Amino acid sequence: MRKVLLSEDEIPKQWYNILPDLPEPLPPPINPVTREPVKPEELMALFPRECIMQEVSQERWINIPEEVRETYMLWRPTPLYRAINLERALKTPARIYYKYEGVSPPGSHKPNTAVAQAYYAMKEGIKRLTTETGAGQWGSALALGCMLFGMKATVYMVKVSYNQKPYRRILMELWGADVYPSPSANTEYGRRILKDDPDNPGSLGIAISEAIEDAITHEDAKYSLGSVLNFVLLHQTVVGLEAKKQMEVFDDYPDIIVGCIGGGSSFSGLFWPFYYDKVSGRAPKDIKFLAVEPTACPSITKGFYTYDHGDTARLTPLIKMYTLGHTFIPPPIHAGGLRYHGKAPTLCLLNKKGIVKTVAYNQVEVFKAAHLFAKTEGILPAPEPSHAIKAVIDEALRCKETGEDKTILFLLCGHGHFDMQAFSDYLSGKLLPYEYPEEKVKEAMQELTKLYPWLKIER
């Protein structure tokens, strides 16, 4: 048996919320002026009310609205495959499985939360949602969600990706979204950056600032986020909950769960339900959770664990996370969805506690892994999950050396059909194995401590 499909009535009816099961309480977002925790009502000017309630909820299981669940049926349940051809090519005793989210209309996992956020906004009478996007997966997912619930979407797309991936922009526009290259002339902050640096390539931090400014200066709009915050990550647990059922059909259970991390939503959506098994004593094995990031944006492997802003203009509260500094401008690598200076606070806490392990790879070795996967399994992966594929191959080869027949599960969170220029660059040898300099991270931390001398900064 190569794949398992579930029926529509097996789509989960509840999302899993990890907050009650963390090893210690999550550090709250704080106001940089008062240094006091930000109250939920302070965030309601920015996000739909129900999203904020989910952000701080201590309820372990949160009901999925029926309208959202019905919309999920456009692409869910998604298939779980066993990568038999890849196993054979590697000559490994390991069993490799992947949950494939590329079957959604935008071709990624992102609509799992985009649909939910658009639904909650629509119920509040909000007419428009603003957001940022890197590679365009999140922007296209929100464009879809807003279209399905009769709303408008405004997307600030990191300029380097806007130019690298025009077909992502076209997809958003076909679904009714307005898309601007960030930094843009559409916001005060964008205009200020362009005045000082007309060729600025953009960053997710800058795009977030623009999207937030747009939302808070227009009464009919609110802001929508594709990763990092708790409510976003819990919406993604439909992925892991389905995967658990599908692994039961295979009569197997993972020893290792692998996923790529930009903000952390796709990996968290897969591993959170298995983490619940672990902490509740239900897991038949001691699972290893392995997160993978690019060496060009090594937030966890080279960053510092401290409070920092989620955006470059410092419009967000301070969030406790691993960070490269909110002034981070990433190199133009092709994994646009992984070019964020920080990570989800829950993921960072679990990494700090040693529950999640993190590794980093450069884009050349990542694209080699993607090429092997495409040649064996037939699916062209997006650059982002190709990081996970590289780690899976390494783990499988380790099993080959030791003779261990471990079970490896990873998330193939999107296809690479919009990434042909990236693969063309790979085939022609134009990709560079970029590593972000340690000195730049230290410089960013020095700037952060100048702003907030009271901050504690640690690895």
Image: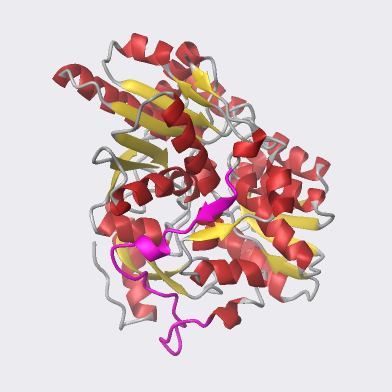
Residue 154: x and y in percent read 75, 57
The vertical placement of 428 against 333, above or below, is: above
Residue 38 among those drawn in magenta? yes
Q: Is residue 299 visible?
A: yes
Q: Quadrant of the C terminus?
A: bottom left
Residue 404: x and y in percent read 19, 22
The vertical placement of 375 against 149, above or below, is: above
Residue 328: x and y in percent read 44, 58
* Nearer to us in this view, 219 or 401: 401
The vertical placement of 444 against 67, above or below, is: below
Give the image's coloring scheme: secondary structure
Q: Which residues are magenta?
A: 12-39
* Nearer to us in this view, 125 or 332: 125
Look at 61% across and 66% down and name the residue there. Answer: 51
Most common SS among magenta residues: loop
The image quadrant that residue 350 belongs to is bottom left
The image quadrant that residue 92 belongs to is top left
Look at 33% across and 76% down and name the residue there. Answer: 449
Residue 230: x and y in percent read 49, 61
The vertical placement of 438 against 398, above or below, is: below
Residue 29 among those drawn in magenta? yes
